[in-house]
Amino acid sequence: MTEADQDIRYKKVRLGAWVGIIGNVVLAVIKAVTGIMANSRALVADAVHSASDVVGSVAVLVGVRAARMPPDEDHPYGHGKAETVTAIIVAVLLFIVGFEIALNAVQALFEPIAMPGMAAIYAIIFSIIVKELMFRYKIHLGKKYRSDALITDAWHHRSDVFSSAAALLGVGASIIGGNTGIDWLVYADPVAGFFVAILIGKMAWKLGSEAIHNTLDHVLHEEDTEEMYKTAQEVEGVLEINELLAREHGHYVIVDIKVAVDPHITVEEGHRIGKRVKDRLMKDEYVQDVRVHINPFSED
């Protein structure tokens, strides 16, 4: 990946993070104010969820900036995993928010509760539309630029869509119950809040486990490195590929490869073959570095 490509990637991912920050601030304020005025616990819980998204998007912004730092003496492979670490932080925040929402919902079931107002319905519908648009925008950027942090943050937005949909059902049922005299339906509002919490917790677990998996020096599967094998084997002088490991390091890949060459050539000739292997593999825009080890070829 060239310096120019990295600059473009950084600007696009940073823009995605800022879209999340601004959008979530606006939604959190609208939902919190409307939820309090309309007496909707589900909507207030949803507002807290949106507020947590702000923290998540700020973490993404910091992580993306850290990941852009060049390799140094302590980090010879670069800082790409900063984004993956950020994804873990966002997942933990998401889990904490889910726990808080669940706790508040359970407490509400044992307290007197009033029917929420219709304004809560309009605020929730608006939130669902905005959040779905933000999800689609961020998931597109995250996949295009291989950003774990942005993909996690995008799914954070999608969890907001799910939670808002649950809140919509709860608030709607509560309003129907209040207007028809079915008193127990009024409690659908906090029940919806509890259901929202379960969805958030499940999403946090999934995203967090994936991020941790990527942090622990995850290597690409054989089917994902097939093209790399073919590319290396086509290099003149390479007789066999003994081993190829491609480690995901955030948004880029570090390749460790062992190639077998004629054991009777000079060290300099072997070095040239290794250099050609590296140059060919580095043409992949996501390969940041290639470490080549030369082995003497043997039929055994």
Image (cartoon, rainbow, N blue to C red):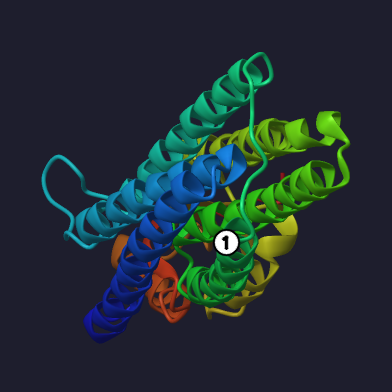
- The mark tally for this picture is 1
What's the residue type where badge 1 is placed? Ala
Q: Is residue 73 above or below residue 61?
A: above
Between 61 and 176, the one nearer to me in the picture: 176
Rendered location of residue 19, percent (x, y)? 36, 72
Rendered location of residue 124, percent (x, y)? 60, 61
Q: Is residue 240 above or below residue 117?
A: below
Between 261 and 144, the one nearer to me in the picture: 144
- Which residue is disc 1 drawn over? 119
Residue 97 visible:
yes
Instruction: Name the quadrant of the C terminus.
Output: top right
Q: Is residue 108 above or below residue 95?
A: above
Q: Is residue 129 above or below residue 157?
A: below
Rendered location of residue 127, percent (x, y)? 55, 65
Residue 268 figure quarter? bottom left
Q: Residues within 10 Å of mark 1 (few under 14, many from 20)?
A: some
Residue appearing at x 43%, y 78% in the figure: 285
Most extreme residue toward the left is 73
Residue 253 visible:
no
Residue appearing at x 71%, y 54% in the figure: 168
- Drawn side of residue 292 relative to residue 119, left or right: left
Rendered location of residue 233, percent (x, y)? 62, 72
SS label for mark 1: helix
- Drawn side of residue 13 relative to residue 46, left or right: left
